[in-house]
Image: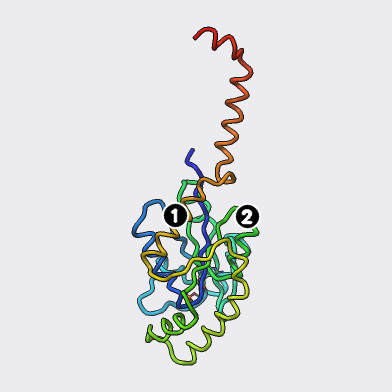
Amino acid sequence: MAEKGILTVVSGFSGAGKGTVMKALTESFEGYALSVSATTRAPRPGEQDGREYFFRTEEQFQEMIAEDALIEYACYVNHSYGTPREYVESRLAEGKDVLLEIEIQGALKVKERYPDALLVFIMPPTAAELKARLIGRGTETEEIVKQRLKRAAEEAESMEAYDYILVNDTVEACKERLHRLIQSQHMRAVANRDRIDRMKQELKEINATDVCKTIANH
Ligand code: 5GP
């Protein structure tokens, strides 16, 4: 049986570059599976159903909740977002390291349901850098930049609930750190329960045989 994968939740302020880091991570290394969420918001130009998101009506979204098809869901700026259960659980069982890029309320719900999940918060080096990146995108109005910075201040209040904080100074360096962090989780005792049980069982079996006799025969 494949060793179970690590479930990692990545959050960060809008403009922190977490999407770019995740993309770089999955393109550079094997073994990752990036979950695609369901949402009730409309697709942006260039977005495809099933690739960026599963775009669903409010009614369909409510049905998914009723069927317990979502691991978590949350409301963000008047729209619902949720993580489909089936994809996440089957990839983890296959041994893939599953990545969820979701906001804070959802991250905390995942931690409640999967206490071994790794919660990572990606932030820019400074607030001034965040502002510069949001303005630099050139796609947002001044009003939206203001809203996002206000939201970032609110989100900063929950950063301590995360297991790790990664500074996105450069995409390359941040991607490497995230990869090393996730891979190190494979060595945690909680990620090795099967191995521990197997060792206990093997030792029991060895001790049940006459150890001295085996040594004497050597
Ligand atoms: P956007 O509409 O800009 O793609 O995403 C808005 C916010 O929703 C982002 O912070 C994103 O991480 C978050 N988000 C995306 N999918 C999910 C999800 O399945 N659950 C939760 N809780 N948040 C999500």
In-image side of 95 versus 211 (left or right): left
The circle on residue 180 is 1
The circle on residue 172 is none
The amino acid on which the numbered mark 1 sits, given as a three-letter code, is Arg
The circle on residue 115 is 2
Q: Is residue 129 above or below residue 111?
A: below
Residue 112: x, y in percent?
A: 65, 59
Residue 152: x, y in percent?
A: 55, 79
Q: Residues within 10 Å of mark 2 (few under 14, many from 20)?
A: few
Residue 53 or residue 159, whichever sits in front: 159
Q: Residues within 10 Å of mark 1 (few under 14, many from 20)?
A: few
**Residue at (42, 65) in percent of width and height:** 174
Can residue 90 be seen from the camera position used here? no
**Residue at (39, 60) in percent of width and height:** 25
Can residue 34 be seen from the camera position used here? yes
Residue 29 or residue 102, whichever sits in front: 29
Q: Secondary structure at mark 2?
A: loop
Q: Marks 2 and 1, Cα distance to the nearest angstrom?
A: 20 Å
Q: Is residue 125 above or below residue 182?
A: below
Q: Are marks 2 and 1 in contact (CB under 8 Å)?
A: no
The amino acid on which the numbered mark 2 sits, given as a three-letter code, is Pro
**Residue at (53, 66) in percent of width and height:** 165
Residue 69 or residue 157, whichever sits in front: 157
Residue 118: x, y in percent?
A: 55, 57
Residue 195: x, y in percent?
A: 55, 36
Q: Secondary structure at mark 1?
A: helix
Quarter residue 139 falls in: bottom left
What is the image's colouring?
A: rainbow
Q: Residue furthest top?
A: 217
Q: Earlier in the sequence, mark 2 or mark 1?
A: 2
In-image side of 82 versus 18 (left or right): right
